[in-house]
């Protein structure tokens, strides 16, 4: 019996090695031959924080690809402006709803309204986010709570509102806009950085939960995107020693890369791709080496007044 169990374990280990080798080769293959981009025409895409910045450009990008776009933002005026600009492009399947994504009751109320007036959301893009570039001891209780509620807690409410229909139909896609600072905290980011790290782990956990309970049969996709520096106006006093390493992206360019990542079913994607790799490589070395390189690169954001 012991010999049989040992042989069985050995067979499992060999099979595991083969699978690992296969998936590594598959990953390398996709680097050189990119995955065919999914068609998003006729999908219902809901984007939070669509009133400005990346969210606005995501709405424009998805509408241009033929999707029905639902814009959510707490600012009704800017949100409607996004909708009207897209309508002026000749795209009629665009809708705007005022919604405070940090408020669970409001999220569920507006989600039900979307469901009745438009249909079931098939692509959810959790983009809404805020930041106060301040030292920890200068952050007010209200500022800390607001950042955590908008950047992290809102993901729980939108997931609870829209995942059930995706699970029922076994199709859908959830996209979360995290940040490169999810991998490394930074000065004046004592509240913002942890929320982005938490979003990363939340997406991993939800994805694994669906994989486990569906016994690997879930077809719902999850994509977490880690942009570096996007010129959205949140951090107004940034300094970069080597702009060629950490490229300043326009919201339009960032949105284009995010949509591309979703359409190729990337599980994770940093923008630009090199930044995530650099952080991984530096982490191999002792902590003091990391900080020497970090200080040499010289990226920082001055505290807000």
Image (spheres, rainbow, N blue to C red):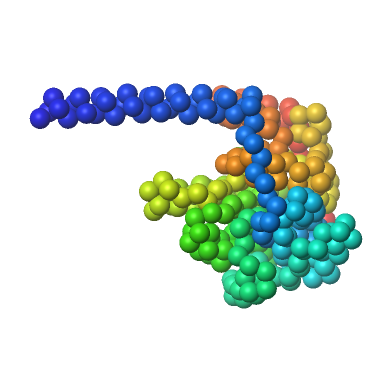
Quadrant for the C terminus, please. bottom right
x 73%, y 41%: residue: 257
x 60%, y 42%: residue: 265
Residue 243 pos. (x, y %): 81, 31
Between 133 and 166, the residue placed more toward the observer is: 166
Residue 266 pos. (x, y %): 60, 40
x 48%, y 29%: residue: 23
Residue 113's image quarter? bottom right
Q: Residue furthest left?
A: 1
Residue 52 pos. (x, y %): 81, 58
* Number of numbered discs visible in the structure rendering: 0
Considering only vertical position in the picture, is 260 above or below 49?
Answer: above
Quadrant for the N terminus, please. top left
x 81%, y 63%: residue: 92
168 relative to 110 in the view: left or right: left
Residue 167 pos. (x, y %): 49, 59
Residue 4 appears in view: yes
Between 78 and 16, the residue placed more toward the observer is: 16
Residue 106's image quarter? bottom right
Residue 49's image quarter? bottom right
Residue 137 appears in view: no
19 relative to 172 in the view: left or right: left
């Amino acid at each position: 019996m012991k010999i049989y169990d040992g042989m069985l374990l050995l067979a499992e280990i060999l099979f595991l090695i083969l699978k690992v080798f296969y998936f590594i080769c598959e990953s390398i293959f996709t680097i050189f031959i990119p995955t065919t981009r999914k068609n998003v025409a006729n999908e219902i895409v809901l984007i939070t924080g669509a009133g400005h910045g990346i969210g606005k450009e995501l709405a424009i990008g998805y509408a241009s690809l033929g999707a029905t776009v639902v814009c959510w933002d707490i600012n009704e005026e800017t949100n409607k402006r996004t909708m009207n600009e897209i309508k002026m492009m000749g795209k009629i399947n665009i809708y705007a709803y005022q919604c405070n994504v940090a408020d669970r009751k409001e999220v569920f109320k507006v989600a039900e309204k979307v469901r009745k007036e438009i249909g079931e959301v098939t692509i959810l893009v959790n983009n809404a986010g805020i930041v106060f570039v301040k030292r920890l001891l200068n952050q007010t209780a209200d500022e800390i709570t607001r950042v955590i509620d908008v950047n992290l807690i809102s993901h729980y409410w939108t997931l609870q509102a829209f995942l059930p229909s995706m699970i029922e139909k076994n199709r859908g896609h959830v996209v979360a806009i995290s940040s490169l600072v999810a991998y490394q905290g930074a000065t004046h980011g004592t509240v913002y950085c942890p929320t982005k790290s938490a979003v990363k782990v939340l997406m991993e956990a939800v994805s694994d939960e669906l994989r486990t309970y569906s016994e690997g049969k879930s077809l719902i996709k999850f994509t977490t995107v880690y942009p570096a520096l996007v010129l959205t106006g949140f951090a107004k006093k940034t300094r970069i020693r080597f702009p060629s390493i950490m490229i300043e992206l326009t919201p339009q360019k960032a949105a284009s890369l995010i949509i591309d990542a979703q359409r190729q079913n990337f599980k994770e994607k940093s923008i630009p791709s090199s930044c995530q790799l650099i952080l991984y490589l530096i982490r191999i070395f002792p902590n003091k080496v990391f900080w020497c390189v970090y200080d040499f690169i010289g990226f920082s954001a001055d505290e807000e007044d």
